[in-house]
Structures are given as C-alpha cells and as structure tokens.
Image: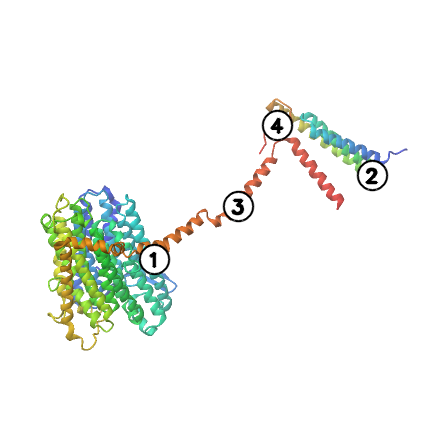
Amino acid sequence: MNTVPVEYGLVLAGILFTLGLVSVLTRRNIIFMLISVEIMLNASGLAFIVAGARWMQPDGQVMFIFILTMAAAEVSVGLALILQIYHQLKTLDSDAANKMKG
Amino acid sequence: MLWLIPALPFAGAFILVVGGSRLPKGMIPLVGVSSVALSAVLTLALAFDFVGSGATSYDQRLWDWLDVAGLSAAFSLHLDALTLVFLFVITFVGSLIHIYSAEFMSDDDGYARFFAYLNLFVSAMLILVLADNLVLLYLGWEGVGLCSYLLIGFWYKEEKNGYASRKAFITTRVGDTAMAIGLFLLFQELNTLKIHEVAAIAPSAWTTGSPVVTLIALLLLGGAVGKSAQLPLQTWLPDAMAGPSPVSALIHAATMVTAGVYLIARMYMLFELAPLAQLAVGVVGAVTLLMAGCSALTQYDLKRVLAYSTISQIGYMFLALGIGAWSASIFHFMIHAFFKALLFLAAGAVIMALHHEHDMFRMGGLRKKLPAVYWTFLTGAGSLAALPLITSGFYSKDQILWIAWAGEKGNTWFFLAALMGAFITAIYTARMIFLTFWGEEKTHVSHAPGVQMVLPLVALAILSTIGGFVELPHTMGHLTAFSDFLGPVLPGVTLRPGAEESEWILQSIAAIVALSGVGLGYYFYVAKPVMADSLKRQAGFIHQFWFSGWAMDKLYDLLFVRPFVFLSNINKQDIIDKLYAGIVSVSETMHRMFSFTQSGMLRWYLAGIVIGAIAVITIGLVS
C-alpha cells in the first residue's frame, strides 16, 4: 500500500489551518467565522491522522474522534449563541457586537 | 469643702453651656454671678477656718487622674497662704467683675456664652492655683489659655478680633512648650511632679547653680514669660484688648497674666538653686517694665495704655521675684489686681458711655459728666502712679524699690530701672487722667453707667486704697501682716547689713519721683498742651517706635512669620505628595492603555491571540 508522505499531509493541514485562520480574522459574519473555526479544527485533526499513520499508532485517530466530538459540541453551543446575538442585535456582524468595550 | 471652690464656677459654666440662650435672660447673670460669688463666700469661710486652725497647709485628694510609669498626678488640691491670696483675689475681684459684666454685656447677643466662658475661666484659674502637682497646674494653665483665646475673640465677627485671639494663643503656646519641656526634665530628674515633694528633694538633688536646675528654671521662666506677657513674648497683650473690657480686667490684668508670677513664686526653691535663672527673671522684669512703660506713653487707645501698663507692672513683679522679694511680689500682685481691674472696668464704662470711642484724644471733660467713674478711676490711677502715703500702690511698689536697693540680691541697676519705671508710670497715668477726664468735652456722653457697674468700681476703689495698709514699711508703722501671712510658704528677704538707715531717703526719692512724674504729665497735657505736640514732632521716630511697642511685632514678622510663610509657599504643592501623585498617574495611564485594548472587537482579540501564539512558538523554536 502506497503511503502518502508525511510532509504532504502536514503541508495540507498547515494550508487548511492558515486558510481557516485568515478567514476567521477577515470575515465579519459570525457564521462564516464559525465555519472557519471548523476548518481549523479539521486541519489539526488531519495533522493528528497523518502523524498517527506515520508512527502506526492508534492515538492519532483517538484524538481525531475527540476533536470531532468537541467540534460537534462547539458548533451546537456556537450556533445557539449566534442565534441569541441575532435576536438581540438583528445583525450577524461581529464588529457590531462590541458591547464589551472597556 | 475646698473642692467646691473651683467646682462651683465650673458648674455655672456647665449650666450656661447646656442651657445657653434657652435660659430666660434674667437667669443668665444670676447663674454666672452667683456661682463665682458663692466661691468667694466659701473662700472667705475657708480663710477664717484656715487662719483660725493655725495650720500651714491643707490638702484634699479628690481622685486619681493619671498613674502611669511612676508618674502619678492626682486630682488633689493644696491650700496654703500663697494659694489663699490668689484664691481671694480671683474669687473676689472675679465676682465684682461678673457683677459689672451683668450690666456691661446685657445688650450683647452672646450674653450666655460670655458668662459661660468667664465662669470656665475662673474655674480653670482656681484649679491652677489650687493644684498640688505640676500636671494639674498645667491643666489649669492651659484652661485659662483657652478661655483667654475664646474671650479675646468674643466678638468673632470682626476679623481683627479673631486675629488678636489667635496671636495671643500662639504666642503663649511658645512659652507653654518651654514650660512643658521644663516639666518633663524635672520629672526625669526627680521622678515626681508633686510640688511639695519637689521642694523637699530639690535642695539635696542639686547643688546651687548646677546646669540642670538652671535649665529647668529657665524653661519654667519661659512659660511664665509667655503667660505674663513679659519680654520677649509680650506682644500679644496689647492686641488682646480686642476682647470686652471686663475680660481685659479679669484675665489680662488681675488674674491670668499673673499666673507666671504665681508659677515662679510657687517654684521658688528651683530659682533659689539657680541664681543665674533668678537673675534672668529680674532682668526680664526690669527691661520689660521700662520698655512697656515707654510704649504706654505714646498710645492713643485708652485700653492699650492700660495693657502696656499691665505689662510694665508685671515687670515689677518679675523684678521683685528676681531679687528674691517673694512676698513683695505677691503683695504687688494683689494690689495690682485691685487697681488694674478697677482701671479697666472704669475704662470700659468710659468707652461704653462714649459709643465705643477708644481714642483718648477724643475724650475729655468727663470729670463732670461721669463723676462716679472719674473718682474711682482717679483712685486706681493714684495707686498705679504710686502717689505717696494715701494709695496702696505706693506701699507695694515702695517695698519692691526698697528691696531692689537694699536686698541681698538687689543692685543699683535694678533699683534705677524700677525708679525710672515709676517715673514713667506716673507720667502716663497723669496723661491718661488729664486727656480722658479733664479739658473740654469732645464726644457726647450717651448714657451714664448704672448701679451694677458703679458698685464694683466703688468696691475695687476701696480695696485698692485700704489694701496697701496690711503691709507698712519700717519707717511708717512697720506692719508686716502680709509677709507674715506668707511666711510659712515663701522665705523672707535678707537685707544688706547697714541698709536700714537709708530707707526713709529712698522712700522720699520714690515719692518725689512719682509726684514729679504726675507734675510733668500736668505740665505737658494741661498747662502747655502745645509742648507735647512739638515734642512728638521733634522725636517723631522715637514716638513711632514706642507706639508700635518697640517694633517687636515687625521684628517677629521678619524673623518668624515671613520665613514660615515663605516655606509654606514653597511647600504649598506638597513636595512629598508628588511621589504618591506619580504612582496614581502612572497607574491611570496604564489603565487607559489597557482599556483601549478592550475594544469589544472579536477579530482584534483573535489577532492578538494569533500574534501571541506565533511569538511564543517563534521564541520556542529560536531558543
């Protein structure tokens, strides 16, 4: 079985992570920010899988399942919060939600 | 029964303070006068008892006041002949002045307040003279200082009165500080502040003239100088005339200002052990009596003349203390209390009759308008000028003059100073009489004083005439009732051998000096009034110098007030506070910076986290 070299997988994970990070920083719509966070989570999950395949260890997959579970929980809580923000502010612009300004 | 004497006026003050203006107007003088009058009656009863029993002293311990680390100051009273003389003067002159004030102050808004202060003063003064330890004495000492402050500034709505009262308070505080240090030192050395214990221990603890006892005596002298308005702390007394006239009579003539004399007489054993300090007492007295006498010559304000004259007469008492003439000093104190209280009360009556006119040059012709005041004032003035034979002032002052010449510690300089002082006194007394009561009328008399004011005047006039006859010199009758009475408390005077023969010569000199002073006053102010004016023009500088009290106020302004104001101006911003203000401003700036980062913008937070993470990773990789 041909294995994909570790470097490729890690570079892909890094690209995905950077994409997610940049879009979290640039997007103003909160839903898109949440999606970008999901991309970043999946990028790190990919890095675990690649590492687990490289050293023939099951830990990588275990960690991925952890991340998946956490992401599901995070999304549900995040969506609930977004819904509340929308109810309160009638907008999804994260910059408009600066009520915590000191 | 002794404790009732100070307690009664205190109770009076208490009632008046609590009741205040809610009391009916008739009640106020009733409470104020009767409390002191009862004390006077008690004093009289006590005096008969005391003299009858033949005891030399009587103690009454009331309760413990302080008892710390070996210092035990009990609230206990001590009665002996010296105290009795002071008690007598305070309560009797005090009651007469209270009676006078009942009419004098009757139109004033602060009627109850006035009597409350006055009663409190009498009570504090009685504690001062009755105290058997120096701590309790100090309590009375500060109490009278407080009342003096309150009463000088009694008409507090005028700014200059408040200024005068603060000046008096602060100036006397300088002396009080010296006295407190003296007491600390005394306690450190002897481990007791009870007066009779000090008297018992002192002679064995120190040799004559040892530095410690000299220092203590000089510090006590500092306290006495402040209270009794002697050089160099005399400047407060002329300004203290801002208070009502009865206050000037009671506090600033008869009683409080002589507290210094009492202190020195009471602690005479220390001064006998410190000849240097005793000499200092005499020099202070001699210089003060001359300086104040010269100032009195130039004043326009009737009350200021009397104030300077008071300083000068207390100078006589200090001089007498300085030459060891203890009982002569107390004798002069008693006589002075009578005639000076009389003069102040009469001056108050004159000023009130003329609508608060203080300037003597705008008075005149009052001899016919206010005969009762004129005759009583004349009696007092005669005593002040020491007119020979008929006035009591002659006998008391002559005794001091005589001892200054013939006493063991006397010398020619003291004698000449005292004689010169007597001459000046006679001149300014005559000036006062002639300007105020003679000549033509210059200000209209609005109303004559009532019977409540005249009665104390008459009583004091009688006292200041017959008071002198309890002690007569060797050449005339040789009666020594007063010094015999004080004998158990204060030691007598040793004369230089062979001096007795010259006594009558000195007496005639003193008499001639007094009479010629009055004559000179008559010549200047009645016979040739132009002369006084031309003299004033020719010696304008000296006149101005004396008028301002030897420019002492200016000197102190230059020496103490200006540097102090300068320093406080520098420190107005509070230099030390800058440090703490700096801490505050740094934390405020940082607070502003951090609160700026709390923008509420989610993406900025994220960017912050990312930058932080990159930085941490970079550091981790590089190192």
Q: x, y percentage for residue B237?
A: 26, 55
Residue hosting label 2? A57
Q: Find the distance from the CA under tag 4 to the CA under tag 3.
A: 37 Å
**Residue B55 horizontal side relative to residue A96, left or right:** left
Asked if residue B525 can be seen in this view, the reply is yes
Query: Which chain does the residue under circle 4 lie in?
Result: A
* Residue density around tag 4, few if under 14, some if 14–19, many if 20 or more, within 10 Å: some
Foreground disc of the pair 3, 2: 3
Residue hosting label 4? A97
| Mark 3: amino acid | Gly
Q: Find the distance from the CA under tag 2 to the CA under tag 1.
A: 94 Å
Q: Are marks 4 and 3 in contact (CB under 8 Å)?
A: no
Query: Which chain does the residue under circle 1 lie in?
Result: B
- Mark with earlier residue (3, 1): 1
Query: Residue sitting at 18 percent across and 50 percent down?
Result: B360
- Mark with earlier residue (4, 2): 2
Q: Find the distance from the CA under tag 1 to the CA under tag 4.
A: 70 Å
SS type, badge 3: helix
Residue hosting label 3? B582
| Mark 2: amino acid | Gln
**Quarter holding residue B602:** top right
SS type, badge 2: loop
Callouts 4 and 2 on one subunit: yes
SS type, badge 1: helix
Foreground disc of the pair 2, 1: 1
Residue extending farthest to the top is A90
